[in-house]
Image: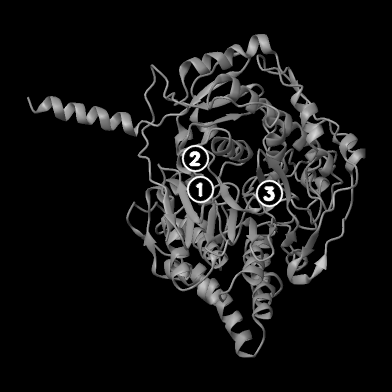
Amino acid sequence: MKLVPTLLLLAFLVSVLCIKYNGKSPVPSGRKETALNYRPIVRGRNWAISSRKALASQAGEKIFLKGGNAVDAAIAGLVTLGVVEPAMSGIGGEAFILIYEPNEGKVYSINGGGIAPKAATIEKYKQMGFENMPMDGPLSSVVPGALDSWLVVLDKFGTMSLKEVLAPAIELAEEGFSASEEFVSMIDANIERIGAFESSKTLYLKHGNYNYQVGEIFKNKDLANLYKELVKTEQSALKKGESRHDALKAVRDRFYRGDIAKEIVKFLQEKGGLFTQEDFSYYYALLEKPIHTNYKGCDIYKSPSANQGLTELLILNILENFNLDEAYSARSIHIHAEAVNLAMADREKFIGDLNFVDAPIDGLLSKDYAKERAKLINEERRLEEYLPGNPWEYQGKPYDYYSIEYFNERGVKRIGTIGKSLDWAGNNIKNDIKDSAKQLASDDSIDTMDLTSYVATADKSGLLVSATPSNFYYFGSALVIGPYGFPINDRASYFWLDERHPNSLQPWKRPRNTITPSLALKDGKPYLAYGTPGGDQQCQALSQILANVVDHDMDIQKSIDAPIWSSKSFPLSYAEHKVEEGVMSIDARIAEDVTKSLINRGWKVSISKSFSNNRACIIRIKDGVIEAAVMSKKESQALAW
């Protein structure tokens, strides 16, 4: 008889734990729910950090407990991510960072995207036999901008020395850390790419032959020694009486202009790369004026140049013309996806490195332009083609692009413009609606690209940081820089070998990056810092997270744990720039009747279980309390005090 009350109690607990959205469960009838153990939101009055790895969040916590601010903690977290999650980011990669500075009441953008070598031209790659940019090896790389971006942020907004913020990462690299399930699986999934390069095999495969086992200790003494050398440079400058700024500049100069740069360039040239010492010397991370829009009372800020961040703002501006009445209804998903496709058409036509491309930024961000784009959306039927608009008609005065090479203290001058003369047609994708609408076989492979990492931090002063680092693909180019123990990125694979495209390959040009942190103010005060991996999916996922918070009043944990979807009707950013016209991949937890309704609207629908592996992280400041959350299922961690 005691069994009945027990069963009733269990049933009650299950009903409480089941996530609901506007009173309706997103779990479809007839499908098994992908189990999630929902985490609680962590809250504090003094500080918070949210990142993709527990050890990175703990590194940030150490800095906070030693008196560092949100920027100091963010840099410690970013550097540590490169040690414990080298597949995703590190000193050989890039970083885009947004910071709200409370004393000025101002948001800053730091562009740590890399540049192509001076010798890298479309003609050169075509002569070598490439139809698209490669994804492995040194021909796929740009000058890594991560370190310079860290130093810019630390110098302008931080309080601690480089020695202090690097200490947790150096300890983990030198003394080792326990290999996690994700660490091992990343090596397993890329073992052939890693095996193609001796330096990579030596670092990531035990005895150069086989993978680590979960729980085994992994050490990277070459990387630890590199960081210790950088610390020596800083400390030596300080002992000579140089300022903190000059000491940090000495660090970046040694990496980009000194002996370290020479070793990196020599190594890359021996592997067939096009880099020269001049390429590294020419490089500087940029301090930029961010772009922004207001979405239903929230001011959303994004990185402006060589970044797809503008695309997220275009999506939000179009969505503002609709009432997204119900989360995960077929109507809401359909409208949102069409907004994505129209924004992506504009991305492909106009957006690139603003030092090379004359883009109509003010016109693209015009609310009147968004209204015209919104009129194209049929709520009952998918569009037959997605064409770019004509934002030049809404441009008005030219966009005031403010950018300085921070440690060079030099404003950036445009190297060239193509702008209106560009004759690339944009994302002109025609869809055969009648024949294409159907449910596709489930294929999680198209949704597992959780490439990239993320850190958000905040402190009681109001300082708020949103930072997205990346190597692009797993372990970047898969080539480890032998003397220093880090893989170099493969971001050059984003370039087009088509001179008509705004993201065409040119010497010293930054490829248009997909890594795009988001930061929001509300009533002029810091409100949200949020980000996610996912390449081209990032703008889609981030706009869904914001809609969950703003339109559907979800708390921050539910907003990132909620089911998501992804449209594919635009060229992917990398390599062959594949298009899957009319395809929408949706989370397996979304109701079956919603799937059928989307098919009736003309979508080719693929059901994906891997969306439950979303890696989003978020921080919200609300009523003086700092909230932090990470997606429930992965090795991410949020901490607060």
Tell which of 5 and 97 is nearer to you.
Answer: 5
Residue 392: horizontal and vertical position, in percent? 89, 37
Mark with earlier residue (2, 1): 2
Q: Is residue 580 visible?
A: no
User: Which quarter of the rendered picture does the N terminus lie within?
Assistant: top left
Q: Is residue 237 visible?
A: yes
Residue 604: horizontal and vertical position, in percent? 59, 18
Residue 489: horizontal and vertical position, in percent? 62, 54
Residue that label 3 marks: 301
Q: Which mark is residue 197?
A: none
Tell which of 570 and 547 is nearer to you.
Answer: 547
Mark with earlier residue (1, 3): 3
Q: Are marks 2 and 1 in contact (CB under 8 Å)?
A: yes
Q: Which mark is residue 617?
A: 1
CA gap between label 1 and label 3 equals 17 Å
> Which quadrant of the figure has residue 316?
top right
Q: Residue furthest top?
A: 434
User: Which quarter of the rendered picture does the C terminus lie within?
Assistant: bottom left
Residue that label 2 marks: 560
Identify which amino acid the numbered label 3 is placed on. Tyr
Mark with earlier residue (2, 3): 3
Identify which amino acid the numbered label 2 is placed on. Ile
Q: Are marks 2 and 3 in contact (CB under 8 Å)?
A: no
- Local secondary structure at mark 3: strand
- Local secondary structure at mark 2: helix
Please give the name of the residue rendered at 75% of the width and 31% of the height, measured from the top-left corner.
345
